[in-house]
Image (spheres, rainbow, N blue to C red):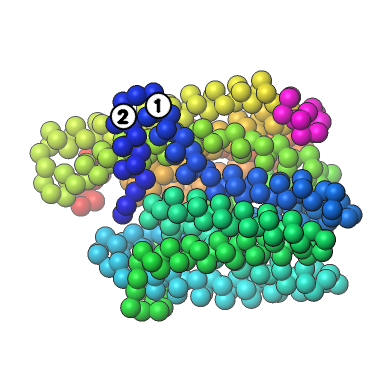
Amino acid sequence: MAGIGFELRKLLKKDSLLGLVQAYAYAGVIGSGPWVLSIVGMLLIGFLSASVVVPPILITQFQVSVTWLIASSLIVTGVVQLAFTRYISDRLFEKRDDIVLSSLNGLLLAVISVCGALGMLLAFVAFPGYDLAYRVLMLAAFVLLCGIWIVTILLSGLKRYKQILMMYALGYGLTVVAALLARPWGLNGLMFGFVLGHLVLFVGMWVIVAAGYPSSESLSFGFFDKKTRYPSLMIIGVLYNLGVWMDKFVFWLYPPTSESIIGPLRASVIYDLPVFMAYLCILPGMAVFLVRIETDFVEYYDAFFEAVRTGGSLEYIEDMRDEMVYSVRQGLAEIAKIQGLALIVAIVLGPAALEALGISSLYLPLFYIQTLGASLQVGFLALLNIFFYLDRRRLILGLTALFCVANLGFTVLTLKLGAIYYGYGYAAAVLLALVCGLYFLDKRLGRLEYETFMLQ
């Protein structure tokens, strides 16, 4: 697989401060660009529509509708995201590149059919009496998002980060422009812009796959074979996405901390704004994560397992193992340092940022704890990624289940304790999962050679 690692290593080989800055900036934009574009795009639509869309509640209805669409589509497609990536990875290892596109088409057909039926049911049952155009646009957006997550996770697995970033920039750029042009039509106009931009995003990413992996077959359903479905990865995909959104759902569905916005969809003014701002603060940590995983760790990981497969000397295997362990420790340490610095910057600049956005300073404590929790989540994501490389699916399943259940339990507990503890449930859940992950990582790396040879 062609990876971003080659370009990062090229920048790092300059052995200069400029090369180092370029590498981290490149990794930050490539790794975090898509979700930053999505957050900024939605906020930009709301900000620029304030004087045109009347009444203003329609803007809130649009943003809440989009948030629920993104959350639900991620959770629903989580059941196939990781499992499909592993399936394609195995086929590429077998040199069966021609099956990538047909397998993608087969999965998309199944996902669009199931999600389309589910979305239609919800559109006409959960929103009785609402405008037909709104319900149709919601259905179209839900189906498109489900397809987008499938193609995005495939391109991420294929390390096509630059193409993903370019398509997200085009898609969300068009979303903003189309939504702004359609503002006179209110909520339906904004939703139309969202659907149009995401249609272009979906088609564009599918074309990238089709151009890179042409296939003689139109459809292939080999992924659905019992031997290649990887049930553990299916459960992990659902649990991780559900865990990430669990605290938001609790605040949205708890009447004292939320309000009804449109139909059954609710939002929490208290909780949502600090969460969005906090996630923008983890870009530096994501950059470090991508640089360290795609350069040092992957290089020594490949060398270690290549030596195992080809009968390398024990001394060389142990050396590569030591280098791999060192790269893991260095990467996690750098993530901790950079996110610690980002947290300090958030504390210093937080009051001014909230004032500039017209947000009450009462949100500051929640913003701080959410930034801490999001920073810890970067470390947790790095751990999961390392365990995926080591193919420790049962361990990942346990950690994601712990994260999901803990986020639910701790968040409910904080609601009972009072407003001063809001946000601590999410941070505590990530911290617990991270500490447990570090413990198991230390144990696994300590006996890596033994477990590797025993599994051969």
Q: Residue 332: x, y in percent?
A: 42, 30
Residue at the spot of label 2 = 14
- Residue at 38% x, 48% y: name it: 388
Instruction: Measure the alpha-carbon separation of dots 2 and 1.
Output: 8 Å
Left or right: residue 276 compared with residue 166? right
Q: Quadrant of residue 141?
A: bottom right
Q: Is residue 278 left or right of residue 1?
A: right
Instruction: Count the marks.
Output: 2
Label 2 Cα neighbours within 10 Å, binned few <14 / some 14-19 / many ≥20: few
Question: Does residue 373 appear in the picture of this structure?
Answer: no
Check if residue 105 falls in the magenta segment. no
Q: Main secondary structure of the magenta part?
A: helix
Give the extent of the magenta segment. 351-363
Residue 315 placement (x, y as % from top left): 12, 33
Residue 18's label in the rendered image is: 1
Instruction: Report the amino acid beneath label 2.
Output: Lys
Which element is circle 1 on? helix
**Residue under the image location 43 percent in, 57 percent down:** 155
Residues at marks 2 and 1 touching, judged by CB atoms closer than 8 Å: yes
Q: Is residue 114 left or right of residue 319?
A: right
Is 321 displayed left or right of 400 in the figure?
A: left
Q: Residue furthest right?
A: 55
Tell me the amino acid under the disc marked 1. Answer: Leu
